[in-house]
């Protein structure tokens, strides 16, 4: 299985062992396209992949296999990851195998929006994370501002207002705010 080495298909896999079917990475397809899917129930990623001869399209493979593949690829450019009933990594003449994860992975296509995109918001996630840290918040609320003339259309020249939010419980809103300039799309 080939995928962009800068990407980490397992980054969003569940860490809670009681959710065993989503503690791995599933190989899913849509038409002729193959993706490596990972979810923890709150977020989902679909990393584009290209199957190679012998790869089994379908199934769930352990996060450890993808971590080993990324580590091997950093040492050796021609390291390979094969997904054919077991995940096997081959690098430097050494082959390491990881057993497939038993279980049924959620239907990822049922949550992918089918409605057309009505707008795009480009932000620098690293800057957003710094603002969240400055706020001491477990989450943030992103407020998008409209043009004063009609009150409906987004004004791309205005910064986004970042307010503290909470993933659990309540947040003590003392008026602290951050501001983030969107990334221009042109």
Image (cartoon, rainbow, N blue to C red):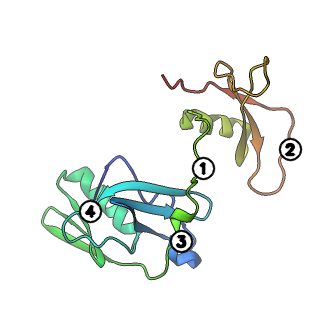
Q: Is residue 82 left or right of residue 179?
A: left
Q: Residue at x 50, y 71 (%)?
A: 23
Which label sits on residue 24? none
Res 85 seen here:
yes
Q: Residue at x 56, y 33 (%)?
A: 122
Could you tell me which secondary element the residue under label 3 belongs to? loop
Of the pair 115 and 186, the residue shown nearer to us: 115
Above or below residue 101? Residue 12 is: above
Residue of label 4: 51
Above or below residue 104? Residue 71 is: above
* Label whose residue precedes the other's in the sequence (1 or 3): 3
Residue of label 2: 172
Residue of label 1: 115
Residues at badges 3 and 2 in contact (C-beta under 8 Å)?
no
Of the pair 146 and 181, the residue shown nearer to us: 146
Tell me how far mark 1 sits from mark 3, CA to CA. Answer: 21 Å
User: Which one is in front in this view, the residue at disc 1 or the one at disc 3?
Assistant: 1
Tell me how far mark 2 sits from mark 1, CA to CA. Answer: 35 Å
Tell me how far mark 3 sits from mark 2, CA to CA. Answer: 36 Å
User: Which one is in front in this view, the residue at disc 2 or the one at disc 1?
Assistant: 1
Could you tell me which secondary element the residue under label 2 belongs to? loop
Res 13 seen here:
no
Which label sits on residue 106? 3
Tell me how far mark 4 sits from mark 1, CA to CA. Answer: 29 Å
């Amino acid at each position: 299985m080939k995928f962009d080495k800068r990407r980490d298909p397992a980054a969003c896999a569940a860490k809670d062992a009681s959710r065993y079917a989503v503690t791995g990475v599933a190989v899913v397809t849509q038409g002729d396209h193959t993706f490596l899917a990972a979810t923890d129930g709150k977020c989902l990623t679909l990393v584009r992949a290209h199957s190679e001869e012998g790869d089994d399209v379908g199934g769930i493979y352990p996060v450890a296999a993808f971590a080993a593949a990324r580590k091997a690829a950093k040492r050796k450019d021609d390291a390979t990851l094969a997904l054919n009933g077991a995940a096997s990594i081959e690098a430097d003449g050494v082959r390491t195998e990881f057993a497939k994860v038993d279980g049924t992975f959620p239907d990822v296509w049922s949550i992918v929006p089918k409605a057309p995109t009505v707008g795009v918001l480009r932000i620098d996630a690293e800057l957003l994370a710094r603002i969240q840290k400055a706020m001491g918040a477990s989450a943030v609320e992103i407020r998008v501002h409209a043009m004063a003339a009609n009150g409906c259309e987004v004004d791309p020249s205005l910064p986004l207002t970042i307010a503290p939010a909470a993933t659990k419980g309540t947040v003590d809103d003392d008026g602290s705010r951050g501001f983030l300039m969107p990334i221009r799309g042109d």
